[in-house]
Image: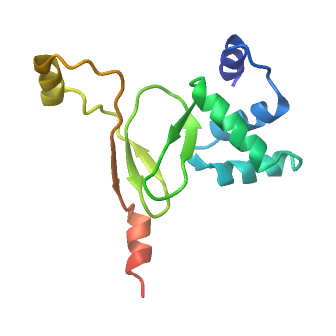
Amino acid sequence: MTGLLNELSAHGYKITPQRRIILQVLSESCRHLSVEEIGDKVKQIEPGISVATVYRNLNLLAEIGIVSRLDLHEGPARYELNQGHDHHLVCLGCGHAIKLGVCPMQGEIKKIIEESGFEVNSHHFEVTGYCQECQTRHRKP
């Protein structure tokens, strides 16, 4: 947590109680959280923090790279602490995201990029579908 706060300071931003709590909530989570989920957890710690404050701070933290934002096709964006380059399997039912641990920009794709002389400045890869729990819920009458 100290490293995150130092990074925030290094970007020239104050370490406010709101930012500290948001980062705490994200650091204690083992999955991506929606703004509403983060807001609920923040309110358990400090009831006076509004969802608007959570939105503003998440946008700032994402902009400076401390937090990563996962935009789902149908559903709210989800957030996690930025732990580097990663790709996901994303459940369209509950929004749960599983890190793949591999990058598809290797092998054949990398070869095609190099051969074409294309200069990549970023890439995004996610596989969408339904987790086992959502599949089970959907099948029940």
Q: Is residue 71 left or right of residue 37?
A: left
Between 30 and 91, the one lying in front of the other is: 91
Residue 104, given in percent of the width and then of the height, sits at 25, 33
In the picture, the quarter occupied by the C terminus is: bottom left
Q: Is residue 24 left or right of residue 45?
A: left
Residue 137, given in percent of the width and then of the height, sits at 44, 75
**Residue shown at 79% from the left, 23% from the top:** 15
Residue 120, given in percent of the width and then of the height, sits at 29, 21
Position of residue 41 relative to residue 11, above or below, is: below
Query: Can I make out residue 66 in this image?
Result: no
Query: Can I make out residue 43 in this image?
Result: yes
Position of residue 135 relative to residue 8, above or below, is: below
Q: Is residue 117 left or right of residue 75?
A: left
Between 75 and 108, the one lying in front of the other is: 75
In the picture, the quarter occupied by the N terminus is: top right
**Residue shown at 81% from the left, 50% from the top:** 43
Q: Residue furthest bottom?
A: 141
